[in-house]
Image (cartoon, rainbow, N blue to C red):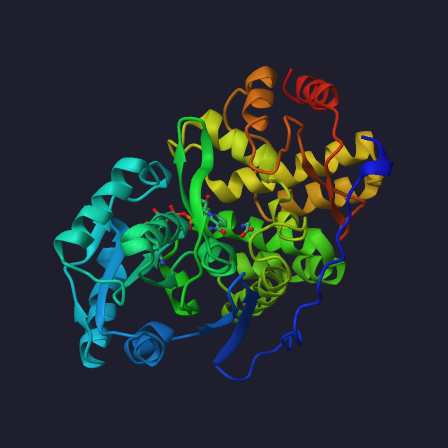
Amino acid sequence: MQTAAVKEATLPKPENSAPQTIADDRNIVRVGFDTRESAKSYDIVIGQGILEQAGERLAAVLPSKRICIVTDENVAGLYLVPLMKTLEAAGFKACPPIILPAGEATKNFEQLQSIIDKCLSYKLDRSATLAALGGGVVGDIAGFAAAMLMRGAGFAQIPTTLLAQVDSSVGGKTGINTKAGKNLVGAFYQPKIVLIDTGVLKTLPERELKAGYAEILKYALIDDPAFFDWLEENGASLLNGDADAQKYAIDKSCRAKAAIVAADADEKKDIRALLNLGHSFGHALEAIGGYDGRILHGEAVGIGCLLAFEYAQEHGPCPARDVERLRAHLQKTGLMTEPPFKVEAKEMFTRMQSDKKNRDGRIALVLVRGIGGAFVARDVDGADVLAFLEKTFG
Ligand code: NAD
Ligand code: GLY
């Protein structure tokens, strides 16, 4: 990597940071962003018990009372009935819910088509809303279906995993996976509202909580070393179910993401690309794993962040002590530091060559000067990456 061509973006500052102790039971973070046509915004409502208020909160922002819930089979068993009740109480005419198989393998063309076929059979018009109730898988595929239905039906996010609450429900990236790789087909399509009920995390399996934690950690690693200090102090209790710590970290993450989306909603300026820290390596690991559940997205991102730090130490400015601090934190919080299967360096390299950040056949990586110092490197030498992967994976 030659530093001269390294492109750096100045990161926008999030609006006022949340207090460490949260006295009120809900916060609202506004996401404002510009499109070619106009400036837009929507609210992320964060708090305990928000699911029970979903009907009235959706009614306040949606143009019609036609709604279709898209969820997965696990979440349906837990939260579909309470959601349908609140929608009914608020006067919504809900279609039969669309219940998808749980897991990453659902993000495919076949499931996308089945969602669209069902919506068309329900005769939903453009004023109707698809509401995603679930994790990032449901949010990504339902959002993409909403973007395509009638060239753009309404879309709302009700995220139920930590990962979806801190990342995927905010910012309008929607899509599916293909044989060629992760999220290679999709659309930028913003929701009209994001409703985050922190109470639903009580039923989330520990492994999924840890996967979501990796995306929280990512915000600290990008540009917020003080937040990394806070995570070193509080990360373990957050993962043990401390509701205040969870709410603080969700609020902090949503503010960080909202600020980045406001500055670069459609990822044209190498600002939003910073959110891809750990993802060039991580997406390649997920693809190698075949989306079969051996490695979750958040697990791959955690390992990917460590690989990005190691690469930046070897080929750039990252001090060894920051790599070790990150590794120690991943270990302390019980996150993966290496993939649970054998990786062939050449296959990993080939996968990384189809990353969406790359341009003109050149690999782009999000690298770091240290904890809190991420930048987009567009002059990465492919031979260096391959050599690094061969050294790492043998
Ligand atoms: P997921 O959607 O597969 O959910 C994980 C598991 O948790 C599933 O089995 C689900 O049924 C279950 N679950 C969900 N909520 C639950 C709850 N409250 N209690 C019990 N079980 C619950 O996985 P995820 O980690 O939420 O999302 C990963 C996906 O998000 C990946 O496809 C990734 O590419 C995508 N993603 C998108 C963005 C974006 O900006 N659009 C950002 C990050 C990740
Ligand atoms: N999760 C990456 C992004 O939203 O840009």
Residue 36 visible in the displayed image: yes
Asked whether 173 or 86 is in front, the reply is 173
Instruction: Examine the rendered structure and indicate whether residue 267 appears above or below residue 50.
Output: above
* Residue at the extreme bottom of the image, as rendered: 24
**Does residue 336 appear to the left or right of 207 in the view shown?**
right
Quarter holding the C terminus is top right
Quarter holding the N terminus is top right
Please name the residue shown 41% across and 61% down the image: 201
Picture coordinates of residue 363, whole percent (x, y): 66, 30
**Does residue 232 appear to the left or right of 355 in the view shown?**
right
The image quadrant that residue 254 belongs to is: bottom right
Picture coordinates of residue 131, whole percent (x, y): 30, 62
The image quadrant that residue 226 belongs to is: bottom right
Instruction: Examine the rendered structure and indicate whether residue 291 appears above or below residue 326.
Output: above
Asked whether 81 or 56 is in front, the reply is 56
Residue 337 visible in the displayed image: no
Instruction: Examine the rendered structure and indicate whether residue 357 appears above or below residue 383.
Output: below
Please name the residue shown 59% across and 16% down the image: 346
Please name the residue shown 60% across and 33% down the image: 281
The image quadrant that residue 362 belongs to is: top right
